[in-house]
Amino acid sequence: MLLLFLLAAAQTDTVRYTVSFPNAAHHEARVVAEFPAAGRDTLEIWMSRSSPGRYALHEFAKNVYDVAVTDPAGRALPVIRHDPYRWLVVGRGRPVRFAYTLFGDRGDGTYSQIDPTHAHLNMPATFAWASGLAARPVVVRFRVPVGSGWRVATQLVPTSDPLTWAAPDLAYFMDSPAELSDFRIRSWTLVAPGGRTDTIRIALHHQGTDAELDAFADATRKVVAEQVAIFGEAARFDHHLYTFLADYLPWASRDGMEHRNSTVLTASGSLARDADPLLRTLSHEFFHSWNMERIRSAEIEPFDLTRADPSRALWFREGFTSYYDRLAIRRAGLLSDSAYAAALANVVNDVVLSPGRRFSSPMDMSLEAPFVDAASAIDPTNQPNTFLSYYTWGAGIGLGLDLAIRGRFEGKSLDGFMRMMWERFGRPVRRYAVRRPYTVADLERTLGAYTRDPAFARDFFERYVRGRDVPDYAGLLAQAGMRVRPAHPGAAFAGPLSLAADSGGTTVSSPVIAGTPLYAAGVEQGDRLDTVGGTPVGSDAEWAALLARHAPGDELPLAFHQRGREVHATLRLVPDPRIEVIPMELAGETPSESQRAFRDAWLGRRS
Ligand SMILES: [Zn+2]
């Protein structure tokens, strides 16, 4: 009976969870965790403080209560709440049963949402785990409400029971969100050059129509094909299966969260209304199946669930992914050249005009993530003047690097660099495992190897990654027959401003940006704006009309109240610094043959 013995041993080795939903209307789940003997007197049980793919602390223990700790026979065991996130159980080396109620009502990529329509479960937000057992296999059984029709969509490993799922260890389990609902499925197969096949599927829980899902799946298929063409293959999913777990529901919150073989896509909107931005998030998260999940920063491998997981590489991990999410949609033919150029202009304006660049490089800005990535605290920050998102800045670096490589190295591009990163660091050699986590120094070395010009790589990193320069976008985009020119020639500019009017007057409701005329005049968010140029300004429209009557160089007397004091100042208008990017042909010019070829190689279809 050796086989039976081995099976029994394997079973007693396993961490088992059972989750049921006896009070879904009030957003509660009941979770029972059964931890095998850990070989130590005291078992340390955690609720995670962070979640894979997120960078801030989320403190999931705040929604855990009604805790009951027993041995397998149901006898109570002594337990100490050691700190806000840890329970210490004196189990004397025996198995421990840890049961609790979980509250969850946020449907996004970090948290869990339980209600009569679904259980949207992010594992760190849902399941307690025990120190010392991270390498043990995990089995979870979902007890769905009777008559709910709920099925399970997840990257967890299936078993013979459709409601029981497995994971090889804690890290994979925590990386594997599950959607329990009556969702709709669309799927298709990718065939790689060597014959390998992978299935992509969308599991969508929404209130829209099947026709909307069909159209979305069709667009997804095209975008996925363009991304696969960049790397030459799909990201070698561990079970030849990748799942988009989408919840587009009025009670969900807008988010996207990448995982190794799946991604969570959530939004309060619908496919009928928001298909374009929802497709962009989808494109972003799928690109992460290479650039994040497998081309993986050493800073997050392994991911630490007990603290924030900071990184200096988010300009690459998130920023280059942002560059490619829209580029893949453009290459799929779902965005025109002019719409793509307009989006590039937004990136260039945000990067060039950001006052945040005064203080930090993209590497240092990456370290701000725990303060901005779904992080919340009650004290105000000066982030509008000190922070430039690593998504935006990184997308700007990606754009600059792609165009610089294309202009300088015949037949090469950022696509080729990404593929070399995939081959050197990403392409898995074992199931569930990262091949070789990279460092920022590895990125620079690989760029030098790919271009065969280490001096170029060193200079680029020195100026744009460790430094705070911005590439010459006008010169780089001209190669593709795209013109960079003032978006509002001759217009006067005072800085971004939003106004809120009520019976007490007109209040500045937006942050005032450093380096703008409004900032120089001493105006601050919350000030009451009395008169500009001698006349009251009661709305954003009146403010815009007033600016339109003036020219750069005009000086306007300004009267406002700041913290109860009356202030008189002078507003000195400047030329509007914002640029636009437009294809030359729309500016009445004819692109040359080489400009056309450059643009086609960059933006044309690959798949
Ligand atoms: Zn991302």
Image (spheres, helix red, strand yellow):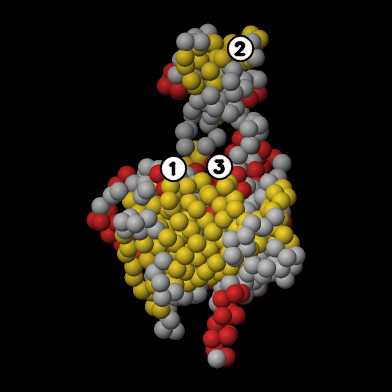
Q: CA distance from mark 1 to mark 3?
A: 43 Å
Q: Which residue is mark 3?
A: 350
- Location of residue 441 with respect to 493 vertically, above or below: below
Residue type of the residue flagged with mark 3: Asp
Quarter of the C terminus within the rendering: bottom left
Q: Residues within 10 Å of mark 1 (few under 14, many from 20)?
A: some
Report which quarter residue 495 is drawn in.
top right
530 shown above or below 158: above
Instruction: Give residue 243's position: percent from left, percent from top.
Output: 42, 65
In this rendering, the label closer to the viewer, 2 or 1: 1
State the CA–CA distance, disc 2 to disc 1.
Answer: 47 Å
Q: Secondary structure at mark 2?
A: strand
Q: Is residue 551 left or right of residue 569?
A: left
Q: Amino acid at mark 2?
A: His
Q: Which one is in front, 393 or 59? A: 59
Q: Nearer the viewer, mark 1 or mark 3?
A: 1
Which label belongs to residue 26? 1
- Residue holding disc 2: 561
Identify the mark nearer the N-term, 1 or 3: 1
Percent position (x, y) of residue 261? 49, 67
Residue at the (61%, 48%) spot, across then down: 61
Q: Are marks 2 and 1 in contact (CB under 8 Å)?
A: no
**Any atom of ligand 1 within 8 Å of the CB at mark 1?**
no
Q: Nearer the viewer, mark 3 or mark 2?
A: 2
